[in-house]
Amino acid sequence: MWTTVVEAIERLIDQPAKANTASGDGIDPAQRAVAPWRIYNIGNNNAVEISRVVALLERELGRKAKTELAPMQPGDAAVTWADSDDLAREIGFRPSTPIDEGIARFVAWFREYHTI
């Protein structure tokens, strides 16, 4: 998982954002010209249900999660996913790590980092 993030950052590091004085997005054009920035979503653009993520974590951790299902809360999104089109357009990079592999690698890293 982290290699995906690192690879995207390595590709982006030599392509700093250019000043964009366009308006319409609520950002003061003068400020944007002084401190140009871009935000990229470095995630796979496939929606994954929370129950799937929990099941993968349970499998990798070897224990059952304690869950309590609740109705949708104010602000909850019914469906979300990463839109990595800007990343693909700018640097030709599209994350491709399957969720199973990403979760497994995250858990392995977490265990090693925390020596558990």
Image: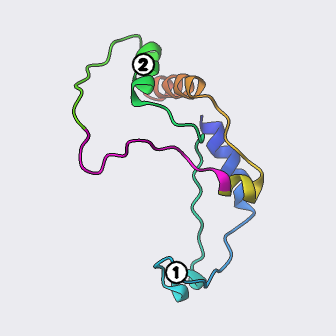
Residue visible at 57% across and 61% down? 39
Between 25 and 63, the residue placed more toward the observer is 25
Give the amino acid at mark 1: Gly
Give the amino acid at mark 2: Ala
Count of all numbered marks drawn on residues in the image: 2
The answer to which image quadrant residue 87 occupies is bottom right
**Would you place residue 88 above or below residue 112 in this image?**
below
The answer to which image quadrant residue 105 occupies is top right
Disc 2: which residue: 55
Q: Which mark is residue 32?
A: none
Is 37 left or right of 72, judged from the image as shown? right
**Would you place residue 104 above or below residue 34 in this image?**
above
**Can residue 116 be seen at all in this image of the molecule?**
no
Residue visible at 58% across and 50% down? 83
Residue 48: horizontal and vertical position, in percent? 49, 32
Residue 101: horizontal and vertical position, in percent? 60, 24
**Would you place residue 17 above or below residue 109 in this image?**
below
Tag 1 secondary structure:
loop
Residue 22: horizontal and vertical position, in percent? 60, 83
- Chief SS of the magenta region: loop
Residue visible at 56% across and 28% down? 99
| Residues tagged 1 and 2 counted as in contact (Cβ below 8 A) | no
> Does 106 appear in magenta?
no
Residue 68: horizontal and vertical position, in percent? 22, 25
Report the magenta residues as a range. Answer: 72-85
Rate crowding at label 1 as few (under 14), some (14 to 19) or many (20 or more) other CA atoms within 10 Å.
few
Disc 1: which residue: 24
Sequence order check: which comes first, mark 1 or mark 2? 1
Q: How far apart are marks 1 and 2 (CA)?
A: 42 Å
> Does 81 appear in magenta?
yes
Residue extending furthest bottom?
30
